[in-house]
Image (cartoon, coloured by chain):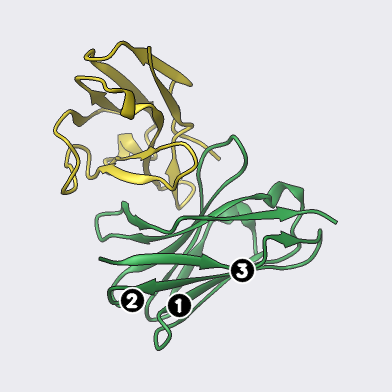
């Protein structure tokens, strides 16, 4: 059950900046639970991209950044590259469902 | 570097029990929550359950009581059993490590499970 809503796709030309939104509610993001982001390249397992709203694991380029406000969060990718074509998922915790929840997923298309 | 590897049958008959094992290598199985997450074809990720190294576990209520998890610290393995499967349980199943801050920081490569007669 995806209670975090993301746009199905976003696109941009190489070098451009794109943002992906993750909209939740008062029982998850709005309740103060942290948001994490994952990148899933075609045919591979998800990889942690951003943790605790705006932190990058070692090895993740600073072209990727995260933010959170109210009941939503965003992932920004600057200097878009062909290798960034992938599916991106947000994740948080929902207190009414008592589960970790993932977003609906967004496909990033590099034009 | 910690690595996770899923193993188990790729084909399960409807109404039977799906059984998967995840083997942890390159690090300790202690002090982390170990999870199963699945992804039906073309769909989003769904958290199934987690187990702590001491055996305490929790599962997604949407799966009702079909989920059983276990851990064997001596073998550095944890397992998932999902009973009464149907076609809706067809998915790629991933095992993953959940860090203290709530993110899944290490993932297995995933294993495809198809439910079909």
Q: Which chain is yellow?
A: A
Q: Which residue is mark 3?
A: B8
Residue count near mark 3 (Cα–Cα under 10 Å), binned few <14, some 14–19, many ≥20? some
Q: Name the secondary structure under disc 1.
A: strand
> Would you identify the image quadrant in which residue B40 lies?
top right
Pinpoint the chain carrying mark 3.
B
Q: Which residue is mark 1?
A: B77
How far apart marks 1 and 3 lie (CA) works out to 13 Å
1 or 3: mark nearer the eye: 3
Q: Name the secondary structure under disc 2.
A: loop
How far apart marks 1 and 2 lie (CA) works out to 8 Å
Asked if labels 2 and 3 share a chain, the reply is yes
Q: Position of residue A21 (x, y in %)?
A: 34, 23
Q: Which chain is green?
A: B
Instruction: Say whether marks 1 and 2 touch (CB < 8 Å).
Output: yes
Q: Earlier in the sequence, mark 2 or mark 3?
A: 3
Quadrant of the snapshot with the N terminus of chain A: top right
Q: Position of residue B117 (x, y in %)?
A: 85, 56
Residue B29 marker: 2
Residue count near mark 1 (Cα–Cα under 10 Å), binned few <14, some 14–19, many ≥20? many
């Amino acid at each position: 059950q995806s209670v975090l809503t993301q746009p199905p796709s976003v696109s941009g030309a190489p070098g451009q900046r794109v943002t992906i939104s993750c909209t939740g509610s008062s029982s998850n993001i709005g309740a103060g639970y942290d948001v994490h982001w994952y990148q899933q390249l075609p045919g591979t397992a998800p990889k942690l991209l951003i943790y605790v709203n705006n932190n990058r694991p070692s090895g993740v380029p600073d072209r990727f950044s995260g933010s959170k406000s109210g009941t939503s969060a965003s992932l920004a990718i600057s200097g878009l590259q062909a290798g960034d074509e992938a599916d991106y998922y947000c994740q948080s915790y929902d207190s009414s469902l008592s589960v970790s929840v993932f977003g609906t997923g967004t496909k990033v298309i590099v034009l | 570097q910690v690595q996770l590897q899923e193993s188990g049958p790729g084909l399960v008959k409807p109404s039977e029990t799906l059984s998967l094992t995840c083997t942890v290598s390159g690090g300790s199985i202690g002090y982390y929550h170990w999870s199963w997450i699945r992804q039906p074809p073309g769909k989003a990720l769904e958290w199934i359950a987690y187990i702590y190294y001491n055996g305490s576990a929790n599962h997604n209520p949407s799966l009702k009581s079909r989920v059983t998890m276990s851990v064997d610290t001596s073998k550095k393995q944890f397992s998932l059993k999902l009973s009464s499967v149907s076609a809706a349980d067809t998915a790629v199943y991933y095992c993953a490590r959940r860090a203290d801050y709530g993110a899944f920081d290490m993932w297995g490569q995933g294993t495809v499970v198809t439910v079909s007669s």
